[in-house]
Image (cartoon, rainbow, N blue to C red):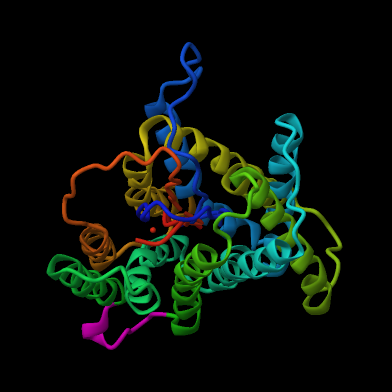
Amino acid sequence: MSAPCEPRATTPASAPPPAPPVPPTPAPAGRRPALDWRIRFAGLSLIWGFSFLLIKVGTEGYAPFQVTFGRLLAGAAVLVAAMAMRRERLPRSARTWGHLTVAALLLNALPFSLFSYAELTIPSTLAGICNATSPLWGMVLSVVALSEDRPTRRRVAGLGVGFLGVLTVLGAWQGFSGLDLPGTGMALLASFCYPVGWIYVRRTLAGTGSSTLALTGSQLLLGTMQLAVVTPLFTSAPTSFPLLPTLSVLALGALGTGLAVLLQYGLVQEVGPTTAQMVTYFIPVIATAAGVALLGEQLSWNTPVGAVVVLIGAALTQSRPRRAAVPDPGALAAVPPEPSEHPDAARLSRS
């Protein structure tokens, strides 16, 4: 699975990394969440951090497209249930559904599938670190696509630092020896899809009149339909349903693509997008720890060192000059991350 954007547009979630914008309004007086926000923050970090391990385990029993289809199906089911409980209505505009179809491809179907294919040949630790590059791609694209988002010296420096970290992770000084280039390339391309999708959504889905939950649920439904069409074309029906991979795919969807979105809604409402987006920086740390401890993946010195440099660069690219606060009760703030979700909408990166 990044940073909050300027408060302009409502954005449906990608899940991880990436996630949706919600109104940054406090919870109603007298109603306090059952769990402290710090506990929910930790839970969200763990869910998205473990997503890469779950993908790895899922691909041991199923084809990558099947993992993605199961993930989207389970995630959509959770959000549809939440919509039913809150009596949310699906969008009615054909134009909105058209834009959501593109968003589902860019933020869900394509990056989720790329990560699944990538983890056939690369460790889950490397996939989690590649996911952390989304803010770097996002800054480059936002400067090109969003003319009002001009770079500062600090952000440009962060971009350079971040990509230096990427080269460190990949071991560029030794000619990328031992690195699976196609798999790593797919993981980086998946991370690139998120900011492309966020910018598209920011430009096309502002002011639709639908709630964020309705847009996100609809987006996941469309992503599930896309994979339902693609999966039979490239895979055959599974002949067995191994327990651990099946549970991994269900957990990946229900927790990492469904419950995580709902947790993020609450965090943004309670503590604001700036604090909520900090989850981005815990995801690669947890993904690396999980891969090493539970999957026995090997870790050379350049992987954690490069990951730290990537995160420092990503943090710098999201820094902004301080401005006097201007009350805007009608504004919506966006946060992403997988991974997600990462100046553009929905930039909390996630797998």
- Front residue (pair 318, 323): 323
Q: Quadrant of residue 227?
A: bottom right
Q: Using the image, determine if residue 138 lies above or below residue 91.
A: below
Visible in this render: residue 96?
A: yes
- What is the chief secondary structure element of the magenta stretch? loop
- 133 on left or right of 13: left
Say which residue appears at 67% left-offset and 46% top-offset.
214
- Front residue (pair 161, 127): 161
The percent coordinates of residue 346 (x first, y second) are: 46, 55
Q: Quadrant of residue 60?
A: bottom right
The percent coordinates of residue 306 (x first, y second) are: 24, 66
Q: Using the image, determine if residue 290 lies above or below residue 155.
A: above
- 148 on left or right of 40: left
The percent coordinates of residue 335 (x first, y second) are: 43, 50
Q: Using the image, determine if residue 75 lies above or below residue 124.
A: above
- Front residue (pair 177, 206): 206
The percent coordinates of residue 325 (x first, y second) are: 24, 42
Region rendered in magenta = 171-179
Q: How many marks?
A: 0
Say which residue appears at 54% left-offset and 72% top-offset.
118
Q: Check residue 287 for magenta coloring.
A: no
Q: Quadrant of residue 136?
A: bottom left
- 329 on left or right of 315: right
Residue at far top of view: 30
Q: Check residue 172 for magenta coloring.
A: yes
Say which residue appears at 44% left-offset and 76% top-offset.
184
